[in-house]
Amino acid sequence: MAKKRVVTQFGMGTSIRSRNYTEAAARAIRDALWHNSLNVADAFGFPREAMIIDVQIGVQQPEAVDTAALLKVFPYGQPHVTVVKGGLDIPRRDKDGYSVVANAAVMVSFDMEPAHG
């Protein structure tokens, strides 16, 4: 396979009160995807299902993210999610606890193996 990246999108998501890392990560993915109207599959003549989608999420507590839930955000393509330490936990000003900030990088690739023959 000759995997060729064609798009990289970035997003940020938050969980202000509930400290839900998965929801913050899902919001970061949506921010990356839905603030951009890219029809890359059509532009390259591929079906949408052919999109290889690599997602990297950064949060302060990577083990608290449900990656299976994040896969449901994608309506098509072949998503793969990796979670690493990053993002921010911001202490709340007047209350106990903190708000969660997640960052997402969404990279879309296709198998662009040259035709043989």
Image: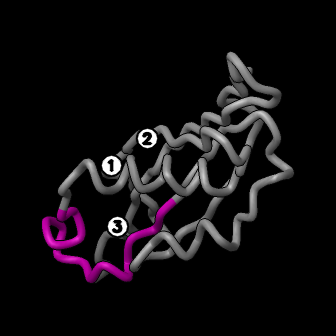
Residue 13, image x, y percentages: 51, 42
Residue 112: numbered disc: 3
Instruction: Name the residue carrying label 1.
Output: 7
Q: Amino acid at mark 2?
A: Gly
Q: Is residue 62 left or right of residue 90?
A: right
Q: Specify start and end residues of the magenta stretch as a single range.
A: 39-53
Q: Is residue 71 left or right of residue 88?
A: left
Q: Nearer the viewer, residue 30 or 112?
A: 30
User: Does the magenta-highlighted stretch encompass residue 97?
Assistant: no
Nearer the camera: disc 1 or disc 3: 1
Spatial separation of the CA atoms under disc 2 and disc 3:
26 Å
Q: Amino acid at mark 3?
A: Met
Figure quadrant of the C terminus: bottom left
Q: Nearer the viewer, residue 20 or 109?
A: 20
Spatial separation of the CA atoms under disc 1 and disc 2:
13 Å
Q: What is the secondary structure assignment of the residue under circle 2?
A: strand
Q: Is residue 98 placed above or below 3 in the rendered structure?
A: above
Spatial separation of the CA atoms under disc 1 and disc 3:
14 Å
Q: Residue furthest front?
A: 94
Q: Nearer the viewer, residue 114 or 66?
A: 66
Residue 11: numbered disc: 2
Tag 3: Cα neighbours inside 10 Å, few (<14), some, or many (≥20)? few
Residue visible at 66% across and 38% down in the picture: 58
Q: Residue furthest right?
A: 63
Q: What is the secondary structure assignment of the residue under circle 3?
A: loop
